[in-house]
Amino acid sequence: MVQTQEPTIERVNQAVDAILTVLGNPDSDLHAQALDAFRHSDYQTVKRLASTNLSDSYCKALGYLGGALKLTPNTDTILAESARAAADFVREKTLHQLGTAIAKALN
């Protein structure tokens, strides 16, 4: 059985840090803008970037995180969705890198 505890800001910040670590350093201007806005607590800008770049998992992951810091009953869900988007970003980035390496090797 899973023991649940109410999230605290300290625990949520640990989860946010873990997600930011997975996302890594931004590798585009869009990602740099989103991360900078997030770090400056400008969550509305981050959400706008996520809503206008719908296929970008990096922005999507950051777009969720501002809501997690509000400690609502949805905090667990918000963190889970952000983590899934971060994992999607890493997967997409890895597939792109592998595709490029294979193309280089075979051409």
Image: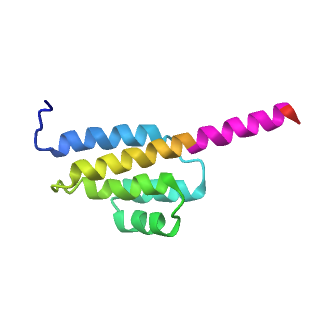
Magenta stretch encompasses residue 94: yes
Front position in the image: 59 or 3 = 3
Q: Residue at x 33, y 53 (%)?
A: 65
Which quadrant would the C terminus be assigned to in this image?
Answer: top right
Picture layout, residue 44 above or below residue 65: below
- How does the figure colour the protein chain or chains? rainbow
Front position in the image: 83 or 2 = 2
Q: Position of residue 37 (x, y in %)?
A: 42, 60
Q: Position of residue 2 (x, y in %)?
A: 15, 32
Picture layout, residue 99 above or below residue 77: above
**Is 40 placed left or right of 97 in the picture?**
left
The prevailing secondary structure element of the residues shown in magenta is helix
Magenta stretch encompasses residue 86: no
Q: Which residues are magenta?
A: 92-105
Q: Position of residue 30 (x, y in %)?
A: 56, 59
Picture layout, residue 62 above or below residue 51: above
Q: Residue at x 17, y 53 (%)?
A: 71
Q: How many numbered circles are shown?
A: 0
Front position in the image: 41 or 86 = 86
Q: Is residue 25 visible?
A: no
Picture layout, residue 63 above or below residue 99: below
Q: Residue at x 85, y 33 (%)?
A: 106
Which quadrant would the N terminus be assigned to in this image?
Answer: top left
Q: Position of residue 84 (x, y in %)?
A: 40, 45
Q: Quadrant of residue 42?
A: bottom left
Q: Residue furthest front?
A: 1
Q: Residue furthest right?
A: 107
Q: Quadrant of residue 11?
A: top left
**Is 107 placed left or right of 88 in the picture?**
right
Q: Residue at x 15, y 55 (%)?
A: 73
